[in-house]
Image (cartoon, helix red, strand yellow):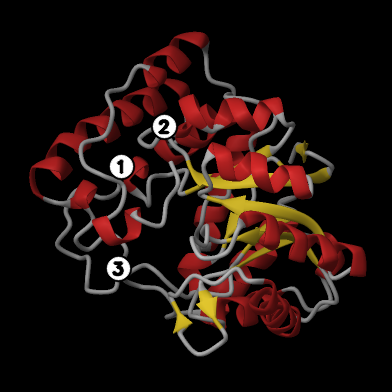
Amino acid sequence: MHHLTLRDLEVSRIGLGTMGMSHGYTDSGTDEAESVRTIHRALELGVTFIDTAEIYGPYVNEELVGRALKGRRGQVVLATKFGMVSHAGAGPWNRDSSPANIRTAVEGSLRRLGTDHIDLYYQHRVDPNTPIEETAGAVAELIAEGKVRAFGLSEAGPDTVRRAHAVHPVTAVQSEYSLWTRGIEDRILPVLRELSIGLVPFAPLGHGFLTNTIRSTDGFKEGDFRHGNPRFTGENFQRNLRIADEVQGVAAEAGATPAQVALAWLLAQGDDIAPIPGTKRVHRVEENTAADGIRLSDEHLARLGNLPPAAGETHPQGARQMLER
């Protein structure tokens, strides 16, 4: 597995997102043993970048990752996120990035993860009630204390990134980025490159869509992220199948799987991009990490780059309000 540097943090080019092991999808949380095997297999294949969050579960995903990494903590750059649980009483799914809440959150994450430090600590979503300068300052204090190594932001807009970075250097910004979600290319990516901030794309496989294994939405149950998602609904879904078919076509010519093609395309967009495809299956992590060895031709990159935009918004309206894009 090749490595790259997110500002000053060295990580594997392809990481592992663990959200789906506990949260967000129809079959999440049903097989902890397989999830642990998947994390262990990722480490065997050279993955050194593991991503979780306080809100996943909530809490149980960090606990799972902590158990899986027991005795192996030194092998990974461990990222988690704060700010989507208000510990002052409002509870989960309430944004709170106040310094006091961050203090409470970090102690809980350290305990659940079984570690004395977090390598990359992201603000999960921008808190409209707390100036980003206060949030950045609170994380800077944690870095000075050795509880955190690096500061990150998730789904933050250009102005927020600049303001946070002025208080303490931002190591990475996590944002949805894939062949069917490319909005950050015009507004966010230029700012990150100007400030030497790395990009960590989540959902690089379009929540499974770009693997070309989803041909119907009938199996999406309540609680699955994709249930009711505009891109997976009605006419939008049928139109978007054409994107999956195009990716499948390139994969057939390149001797790869659609997932590998989607990841290889992302890796070709720059040496400051480290996607974190999520899975809880050993065979999927084997497939995904193999994308590190795939080099697409200029023709294939051009074909993929010229795919039409996906039909439909990436999130329902309520969730979109939390995104700064």
**Count the marks: how many?**
3
- Amino acid, disc 2: Arg
CA separation, marks 1 and 2? Answer: 19 Å
Horizontal side of 104 relative to 17 (left or right) equals right
The residue under label 3 is: 224
**Mark sitting earlier along the chain (1/3):** 1
Vertical relation: 156 (above or below) 257: below
Residue at (74, 82) in percent of width and height: 107
The N terminus - image quarter: top right
- Of helix, strand and loop, which one carries label 1? loop
Mark 2 vs mark 3, foreground winner is: 2
**Image quadrant of residue 142?**
bottom right
CA separation, marks 1 and 3? Answer: 18 Å
Q: Nearer the viewer, residue 150 or 99?
A: 99
Horizontal side of 238 relative to 7 (left or right) equals left
For disc 2, the neighbor class at 10 Å (few under 14, some 14 to 19, many from 20) is few
Mark 1 vs mark 3, foreground winner is: 3
The residue under label 1 is: 212
Residue at (55, 61) in percent of width and height: 124
Residue at (33, 53) in percent of width and height: 320
